[in-house]
Amino acid sequence: MIQTDDQMLLAQQCVTNLRRILLEARKVHSQQDYLRLAEPILLEVQQREQEILEYLSSGLEEPLAS
């Protein structure tokens, strides 16, 4: 769970790195091998992106101070 801006920025960097790994893997692996390799990485990307969205949307329920 992301609790600080620094943790959110780190999570974004991790997602960027994982995407870069997937892009490179597509170039050197067969489709079948890539799908096996990519599945857990894509799940990790999805989870981290969800955590980022949850962090960024936290506090939206509270009214803005006037």
Image (cartoon, helix red, strand yellow):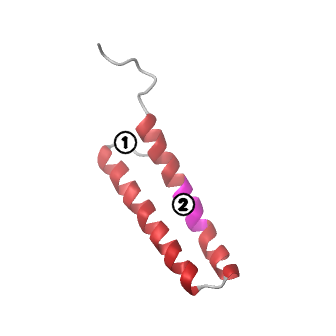
Query: In the image, residue 44 lies at what x, y percent?
Result: 54, 60
Above or below, comparing residue 3 to residue 43 in the picture: above
Residue 47 relative to residue 14: left or right? right
Query: In the image, residue 22 lies at what x, y percent?
Result: 53, 73
Q: Is residue 42 magenta?
A: yes
For the residue marked with disc 2, what is the amino acid?
Glu
Q: Determine crowd level at label 2: few under 14, some 14-19, many 20+ residues with C-alpha closer than 10 A.
A: some
Q: Which residue corresponds to mark 2?
A: 44
What kind of secondary structure does the magenta stretch mostly adopt?
Answer: helix
The residue shown at (58%, 63%) is: 42
Q: Is residue 14 magenta?
A: no
Q: Earlier in the sequence, mark 1 or mark 2?
A: 1
From the viewer's side, name the closer residue of 64 and 48: 64
Badge 1 marks a residue whose secondary structure is: loop
Give the Cα distance between marks 1 and 2. Answer: 18 Å
For the residue marked with disc 1, what is the amino acid?
Gln
Above or below, comparing residue 51 to residue 60 in the picture: below
Above or below, comparing residue 21 to residue 6 in the picture: below
Q: Quadrant of the C terminus?
A: top left
Query: In the image, residue 13 lies at what x, y percent?
Result: 37, 60
Query: In the image, residue 16 lies at what x, y percent?
Result: 42, 63
Q: Which residue corresponds to mark 1?
A: 3
- Give, as a single range, the part of the protein colored magenta: 40-46
